[in-house]
Amino acid sequence: MLDLAKLAGQIPGISQHFKQEVNASKQRVAKASYLLDEIKDRQEQLIEVHKEWHDRFIFSAAVPLEPIDTRIPISAAPYTHSVFATDGSQIAPSHHEIAYCYLINVGRVMLHYGQNLHPLLDSIPAVYYKAEDIYVSKQWGIKVEEWMGYRRTVLEAQMLSEMAYRWVKPPGAHHEPNLALVDGSLIYWFIDSLPAEAKEQILPPIQAAWEQLRRAKIPLVGYISASRSTESINFLRLQACPHLTPNCTINCGDSGEEAAPCRVIDPLRDASLWGFLLSPGERGPLWQSYLRILDSYEPQQRIYFCYLHVGTEIARIEIPAWVAEDKELFDRSLAIILGQVSKGYGYPVSLAEAHNQAVIRSADRTRFFALLEQQMIKAGMHNVATSYKEARKRGSIA
């Protein structure tokens, strides 16, 4: 139990610290705005510098594909459209439960506007209990809990693609504007360090699902709330670099990134800068990400992004190359996203509902293991029970 009386004495110090951080952040934003003004006249030159030297940077910088001072107001969403979204949750395996297995639950949402059609709101559970499911990742030194998270990401992409593709492809299907939404980034940087064999189990199925969406011309968008990315901020570091050439490995290799002289606005985040520059309903310039994991992506699936002021926050919007290259598709996708945020009172309603469908509550977990226990007893198994440790944690005798 948390002792709030003992905690109360620490609160004033925390609030004072964050007050100082707010003031410091304003100063960093002012410096960043100054760098942006300097970049306007030499943006193409800096892009060429990035092209020549980015493989020797000690940071990852995105490249703007539009003038860096771009501010574009987003139009209203089309009256008739459909939105598809998925999100996942899981029950992690535990040796203290009656069976060592894990469950992934993917929530699915299909919302139709201006069509007088019923929505789809459901979830699809999948239980993994066989040795080849549980222990396959150990050959690569990956923990079961970590592998479960990767499997969840694959299932979310596959179910999103399948749901949307089935909607638009049958004879007589609806071909109004559509949008497939993902909660979070489309850049799966976390698999960059995986062995090649493990990566082959994760990335190709996701890319295949995205390809199915591309063939159906259903734009895919990753919506990132409270992004902590610095990819666009890092492009400003090229302007702040005091060296003749930005060869970080030679110029700053000994001191390391922490002491790099180009970090004049660190630790400012992209969202903080664009929150100062954008008005509600506006987007900033389109950027191409150069994170290393994207070298493993198919060319049409490489990720681009922009920042969008949705009214309540600055959201990072990620799209694959084939969406970025179709201006009409891109603009319409942003319009639908703004509509989704408005309907969801600050967050896309389809993603919020997909989460609600996916979430596994404590009571759901209890019922799952109770059902499993019943079936194991019915199958003739004896001494089916949780460990003494788990049993004592679920109740108190004090």
Image (tube, rainbow, N blue to C red):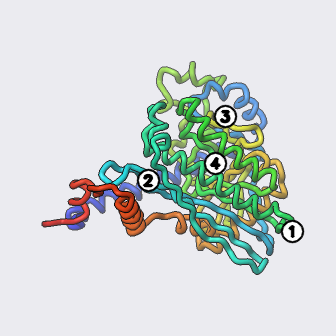
Label 4 vs 3, first from the N-terminus = 4
Mark 4: amino acid: Leu
Which element carries disc 1, helix, strand or loop? Answer: loop
Mark 1: amino acid: Gly
Residue placed most toward the observer, 398 or 67? 398
Which element carries disc 2, helix, strand or loop? Answer: helix
Labelled disc at residue 296: 3
Which element carries disc 4, helix, strand or loop? Answer: loop
What residue do we see at 48% from left, 20% from top? Answer: 254
Labelled disc at residue 21: 2
Mark 3: amino acid: Ser
Residue placed most toward the observer, 332 or 194? 194
Label 4 vs 1, first from the N-terminus = 1
Labelled disc at residue 172: 1
**Mark in front: 4 vs 2:** 4
Q: Is residue 361 above or below residue 61?
A: below
**Mark in front: 4 vs 1:** 1
Label 1 vs 2, first from the N-terminus = 2
Residue ID for mark 4: 186
Q: Residue furthest bottom?
A: 116
**Mark in front: 1 vs 2:** 1
